Amino acid sequence: MAAESVLNFFEQPGSDGDNTLTIGGSAQSANGTNYLSKLISIPIGNISNAGIVWIVPGIAGTITKISCVIDAAIVTADAGVAFALDGVDITDAALTIAFVGSSGGTVDQSVPTALNVISATQAIRITKDGASTNNSNGLVTFQIEPS
């Protein structure tokens, strides 16, 4: 017997106006994307310049993915970007932006595996190693699953 495709609907009785739906725990799409995840983005300036940028996310949770997009090619060497909480590197979070084949729109991502739980008022330190050359601005996005 073949499996039947079933559409699931949620209907909330009540007024004919907008109703509030409150979800506790996890709400996921069919492919496992958590609908409760928050995205926090911060421009980090020229990734070819060594330096530190700080961000306070404003929400408590677990950093599950970090992405960086650049707006121009870099040359000479790869650019390194590291992430830390309270002076301790977030495990498996560091990004290496390869200069070979880089261009505007190049995206690099990491999936932190430990030391990635943050409070709403805790600062994240973003460190650029400045190893590359050529002006290329970066934008870092943190995906955080609220706790």
Image (cartoon, rainbow, N blue to C red):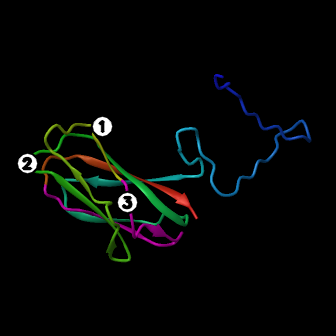
Q: Nearer the viewer, mark 2 or mark 3?
A: 3
Residue shown at the point (70%, 57%) measured from the top left: 24
Q: Toward which corner of the image does residue 54 lie, by quadrant? A: bottom left
| Amino acid type at mark 2 | Thr
Q: Position of residue 124 (x, y in %)?
A: 40, 67
Write the start and end of the magenta stretch as one range: 111-131
On screen, 36 above or below 71?
below
Q: As rendered, which of 87 and 43 lies closer to the eye?
A: 87
User: What's the mark number on residue 105?
Assistant: 1
Task: Provide the secondary structure element on which disc 2 rests.
Answer: loop
| Amino acid type at mark 1 | Gly
How far separated are the C-alphas under marks 1 and 2? 19 Å
Residue shown at the point (71%, 52%) measured from the top left: 23
Which residue extends farthest top?
2
Q: Position of residue 14 (x, y in %)?
A: 92, 42
Q: As rendered, which of 34 and 129 lies closer to the eye?
A: 34
Residue shown at the point (73%, 33%) measured from the top left: 8
How far separated are the C-alphas under marks 2 and 3? 28 Å
Q: As rendered, which of 144 and 48 lies closer to the eye?
A: 144
Going from the N terminus, do you reach mark 1 or mark 2 first? Answer: 2
Packing grade of label 1 (10 A; few <14, some 14-19, many >=20) is few
On screen, 92 above or below 14?
below
Task: Kindly identify which residue carries mark 3.
Answer: 112
Residue 30 left/right relative to 13: left
Task: Kindly identify which residue carries mark 2.
Answer: 76
Packing grade of label 3 (10 A; few <14, some 14-19, many >=20) is some
